[in-house]
Amino acid sequence: MQIDFATAGRIIFGAGKMNELAQIANGMGEKAFLVRSKSQPAAQKVPDLLKSVGIGCVDHIVQGEPSTPSIRAAVEKARSEKCDFVIGMGGGSVIDTGKAVAAMLSNNGDLMDYLEVVGLGHKLEQPSKPYIAIPTTAGTGSEVTRNAVIAVPEKSVKVSMRSPYMLPEVALVDPELTYSVPQTVTASTGMDAFVQVIEPYVCNAANPMVDMFCRDAIPQAAQYLPAVYQDGANQKARDAMAWVSLMGGLSLANAKLGAAHGFAGPIGGMFPAAHGAICAAVIAGVMQVNIRALQEREPQSPSLQRYAEIARWITGDDQAAPEDGAEWMSSLCRQLQIPSLGRLGIQPSDFELIVEKSQHSSSMKGNPLVLTKTELIRILELSL
């Protein structure tokens, strides 16, 4: 057995931990570049917290998902302000923006030099500037991953910038920051977290350490995501989903993903749809098609047995078959009012291009087995 496990330099988890930001940042530099979402009230107290230990703060609001133009603009601003380190406070888009900014502040060249698939894919030569990642949604787990998903408008695709240097120095996960998240965002980000503990568990690069995280998180997601959707004030459920999100980040960063995320990048680049919503829209179809393909071509695959385990955990039925798990996920998406691909603006005429782009995505390479073009189109049909 061989395992290569990497994560943030320090993980801090717990309600109220945001109040320790000043002590955590002390010593990282004289001026912070605060990347944040406009809608996050807690971010407004960051400058005062930092001021208490003599640290200045430059505020930068992120609107929408990270793109090559938006990141270039943020890097230019941080450089002109001579910022020493970066704080990212928000959802996955904000956290990823902060990762990319921290990396580019320490490395020469253009952003495209370092992007996968459509860029040159060069490795970062220098460690990123110190980065504190503070998630305010329970979804992406980006605070403990080594990549940033970035839209390239001229290519109509989302790709990753990836390096061990991009792991945050500190992941500060305070579930209290998620308590006010709206119901629709709770649903889409929660499904993203759920998918990110399912796909690493069944992927073709699963390992015992990641398995621990997934086995702990999958049953909790099944229990607490419906609960927090019904009652956003349920603090126990909020805390549990923040934990699931963290486990998902640790898992995907140290194993692989699969077809759901394989579709999410290309679709997200072609349509104005949130990453979590896309993953949620396709996951039941991915599970159904994967299970059938495994039964037909690789019936002895450990991934098929793992789909059966997932089915038992999420349904609560010790006799559940793999297909029951796929149906349960489909039912959950209906309960959470997750929009279908059709409602996201996708038409059958888009399928060919989506599949072509998805086949080249890094996430697709982690799927339990290689799916045919016909099977990939079938997933899209089931998700429409």
Image (cartoon, rainbow, N blue to C red):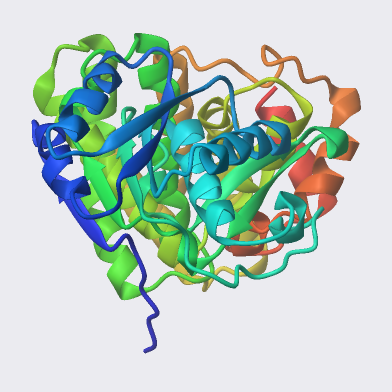
Along the line of sight, the residue nearer the viewer: 316 or 227: 227
Residue at image point 86% right, 39% down: 155
Question: Can you tell which quarter of the image residue 43 is in?
Answer: top left
Q: Is residue 317 left or right of residue 277?
A: left
Q: Position of residue 289 (x, y in %)?
A: 64, 46
Along the line of sight, the residue nearer the viewer: 32 or 307: 32
Q: Is residue 382 above or below residue 197?
A: above
Along the line of sight, the residue nearer the viewer: 108 or 214: 108
Q: Does the image show residue 260?
A: yes
Residue at image point 34% right, 41% down: 31
Q: Is residue 322 above or below residue 63?
A: below
Residue at image point 65% right, 33% down: 73
Question: Can you tell which quarter of the image residue 367 is in?
Answer: bottom right
Along the line of sight, the residue nearer the viewer: 143 or 358: 143
Q: Is residue 274 above or below residue 196?
A: above
Pick the quarter of the image with the N terminus. bottom left
Pick the quarter of the image with the C terminus. top right
Q: Position of residue 296 (x, y in %)?
A: 66, 61
Q: Position of residue 39 (x, y in %)?
A: 39, 12
